[in-house]
Amino acid sequence: MTLREPQVGATVGPMMTSDDALSDTPTHSLTGRLVRRHGAFILQCDDGATFELRLSRVPVDHVGKSVTITGRLLGPDLLEADGVRAA
């Protein structure tokens, strides 16, 4: 496949950002215990699975408690959290 430069005056479509790519990723709700390990926040699910969390806000009030986290999977054990609430 050969890439071509756009012609002068040609319109180019909008660029896709990482946020655009995430908007197509399904949202999941997971329940478990929120723990802090080596500076990271971890969700220990009731079924034994663990997820490292990417958080926009630090949920210190929920550490050590049962929570439900809504977010998008970025990898097999990495979740970008949109929300954290008590379970």
Image (cartoon, rainbow, N blue to C red):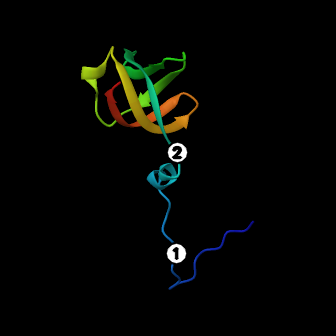
**Disc 2 residue type?**
Pro
Residue, disc 1: 12
Q: Position of residue 52 (x, y in %)?
A: 46, 25
Residues tagged 1 and 2 counted as in contact (Cβ below 8 A): no
Q: Nearer the viewer, residue 47 or 75?
A: 47
- How far from the left and from the top, in percent, is residue 18? 48, 51
| Callout 1 secondary element | loop
Packing grade of label 1 (10 A; few <14, some 14-19, many >=20) is: few
Say which quarter of the image contains residue 67.
top left
Lateral position of residue 2 relative to residue 70, left or right: right
Tell which circle, 1 or 2, labels the residue nearer the N-terminal end.
1
Left or right: 22 as drawn, with respect to 87: right
- Disc 1/disc 2 C-alpha distance (Å): 28 Å
**Mark seen at residue 26:** 2
Q: Residue at x 72, y 68 (%)?
A: 2
Q: Position of residue 44 (x, y in %)?
A: 46, 18
**Residue positioned most to the bottom:** 9
Give the numbered dot on residue 66: none
Give the image quarter of residue 64: top left
Q: Amino acid at mark 1?
A: Val
